[in-house]
Amino acid sequence: MVSIPTAVDPRPPLPQDGLVLTLALPYGRLPAPGDHPDRERLRQRHDAWFRERTAGLGPEQERRLFGQCEGVSLMCRVLPGADAERLLGICLAASVLFLLDDATDGDSDEASQADRYLAVLAGAPADGGSAHLRLLGQTLARVRQGVPDRLWARFVAGFSEVIATAAVKSAAPVRDYPGYLAVRRADAAFDLVGVAIEHGLALDLDLGAGPEQESAAALLDACFEHTILVNDLLSYRKEYAADEPMNAISVLRRTRGLELQQAVDLLCERLAAAEDAFFSEAARLLAAAQGRPGGDPAGLRAYLDAWSLMLSGNLAWSLACPRYHGTGGGWDWERGAPERMALYPDRTEFAGRS
């Protein structure tokens, strides 16, 4: 039996000439990543909204909101066919969630105010709270516009779970890979992506009951694992320096005694399995909907197409993200799947076939 150490040994700094890892990313089945045709105008409106309301947050937090690889660029890749006005609200929600993820992480002062955040999400006023709390209240009022009650209830529940988990996750280190996935499912706001897809495409689907329920749950499990593992793999350089415990590579190394390349290999295997599961469950869902009286195959097909674009869009976004890879790093997915990843102290470089 592999013993489980309580902490990873202190790691040496990344070498100046790079730590090279081989990659086996799945490639060729997902659609090419998209991008919303109105992205630039959406970014301008998004930035104007926050610039009017970020006094007191400080330049670092403002930089994080307006970085090129934050809420707007991600959601425009995820929902390239969404109505622009609906997508603006989704982008605002994504960016304020990114900001609050930083602000409430660990033992910060904001994390100690989790009850107030949860109250504001439930509709309480943010008067007298911190600048972050007031920003949340203002943004929620804008995001709420045009969202059906059913979806809004799911949005509030998902957002509340993120805040509640952020307040306690550092005190409860995970013991194994399944435990890690369970914490990340609550922490990563993944369930909000489904809300964004349904709202952005004006869909009215109920996959929580009936014969499709089991396949829908399995499909979302596959999408979740694919999304999280892509982000964990491609953000590893940034999180290596901080010795971030909530990363699948770190968890696999700590709990299974794996070397770094072994952990990366296993993660890539899990990614490929998640992609296979997505296509399998999507086919099952469509077959069930087509055979059921009153089913909506067209709406379901749009929903599944959006999830496939979510997976490819998140992959392209994560490969190009300066926040992960530093200045001069990153990779353009249009060049195919990279086969090597070199971790430097200040950047991540990728390479394809030699």
Image (cartoon, rainbow, N blue to C red):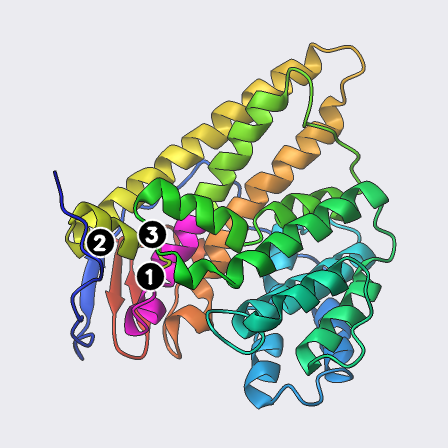
Asked whether 171 or 344 is in front, the reply is: 171
Q: Is the stretch drawn in magenta largely helix, strand or loop?
A: helix
Q: Amino acid at mark 2?
A: Arg
Tag on residue 248? 3
Residue placed farthest to the right in the image? 146
| Residue 287 on image: x %, y % | 62, 15
Disc 1: CA contacts within 10 A as few (<14), some (14-19) or many (>=20): some
Quarter the N terminus occupies:
top left
Quarter the C terminus occupies:
bottom left
Q: Does dot 1 land on a helix, a strand or a loop?
A: loop
Reading the image, the residue beneath label 1 is: 245
- In this rendering, position of residue 6 left or right of residue 26: left
Q: Amino acid at mark 3?
A: Ala
Disc 3: CA contacts within 10 A as few (<14), some (14-19) or many (>=20): many
Please state the extent of the stretch shown in magenta in the rendering: 228-244
Q: Marks 1 and 3: in contact by CB < 8 Å?
A: no
Asked whether 150 or 52 is in front, the reply is: 150
Q: Is residue 104 above or below residue 175?
A: below
Q: Quadrant of residue 301?
A: top right
Q: CA distance from mark 3 to mark 1?
A: 8 Å
Asked whether 125 or 156 is in front, the reply is: 125
Say whether disc 1 or disc 2 marks the residue closer to the N-terminus: 1
Reading the image, the residue beneath label 2 is: 254
